[in-house]
Amino acid sequence: MGKIKKKREKKTDYSGYLYILPFLLVVIIFWYLPILISGGFSFTNYNALGTPSFTGFGNYKSLFQDKMFLKSIRNTFVFVGTIVPLQTLLGFCVAVWVNNRRTTWLGKIVRNVMFIPSLASTGIVCIVWRILLNNNESPLAHFLAVFGIESNMILGSKEMIYPALISMEVLMATGYYMVLYLAYLAEIPDSYYEAAVIDGASGIQMMRYITAPLMKSTTIMILFLGVMGTFQAFDMIYIMTGGGPGQGTTMTLMMSLYQYSFKYSKVGYGMAIGNVLIILVVFLTFMQRKLLNQKTTDLY
């Protein structure tokens, strides 16, 4: 009898895997399989028309000799290095301000107004921005004229295009990150702040020594979400500048991938660019997990 019981205990029920099987198949077919296919084609000179021929690491060697590709990497890191810190800091500050006024009508209005841009389609927002910038009678044109800026010259100016695109992306993304911060701010016990008030702490000190340390894990998550999102940004650049003005002024990795794959029909070369981007995203994901597995707060 004892042996029979042991055999029954060792029997594992695999029926639960049937529930995740449809989702697993979707992930394999639409995620892992395309990655494997792109990896294979990146070692060929495939042009979407003829038969691909094996070229080894030729595409990857050519990438790091391609001035436009190197420029797209630099531009991508410029966007990441400016957009991500700005939208993270602004999202945190607005979230703290709204959380302190969550029961007031002004706090509710600011929360809703800040979140609306993140709900809109990026394509539609970019088209509206183009119309406003190219119309000398638009409210935005009159506002910029106060500072001596001609709105219809921004998209064609190498000096002005970066601030314009960065401002657009920050304004569109800040509301989303504000909501993420608000969700975690609501979980901080009020007793921490009450004890700090009794000890005579100011608002800045409470933010520095209570709010910021407790929000460390959230900030890490938001930073990596922003980095990965900015690395893969395409629609805003495509609609607003197409990689210009000039020769690749705002060319990014995603724009470079699109142009080589679809405009120049160098599919193998484009897939090599895509694989470089995948490697960067995988590395960032690994770093995020390492950081989140460490001590997530300095408060205790």
Image (spheres, helix red, strand yellow):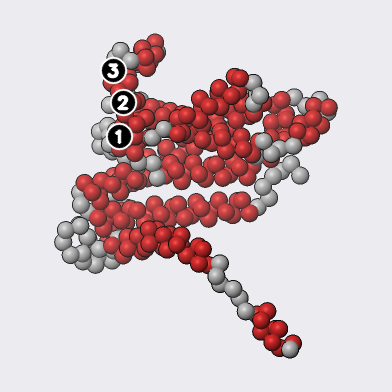
The percent position of residue 261, horizontal first and vertical second, equals: 25, 51
Q: Which quarter of the rendering shows the C terminus?
A: top right
Q: Residue at x 30, y 60 (%)?
A: 42
Q: Is residue 289 above or below residue 130?
A: below
Quadrant showing the N terminus = bottom right
Q: In the drawing, what numbered circle is on residue 135?
A: 3
Q: Decide if residue 105 is in sight here.
A: yes
- Mark before the other along the chain sequence, 3 or 2: 2
Residue count near mark 1 (Cα–Cα under 10 Å), binned few <14, some 14–19, many ≥20? some
In the rendered view, does 166 fall on the left or right side of 259? right
Work out whether mark 2 precedes mark 1 in sequence or the reverse, and give the earlier one: 2
Badge 3: how crowded within 10 Å, few (<14), some, or many (20+)?
A: some
Secondary structure state at the residue bearing disc 2 = helix
Between marks 3 and 2, how big is the CA–CA gap?
8 Å
The alpha-carbon separation of the residues under discs 1 and 3 comes to 17 Å
Residue kind at label 1, given as amino acid type: Ile
50 or 159: which is nearer to us?
A: 50
* Residue at the spot of label 1: 239
Query: In the picture provided, is 244 more to the left or to the right than 209?
Result: left
Q: Secondary structure at mark 3?
A: loop
Which SS class for mark 1?
helix
Q: Badge 2 is on which residue? A: 130
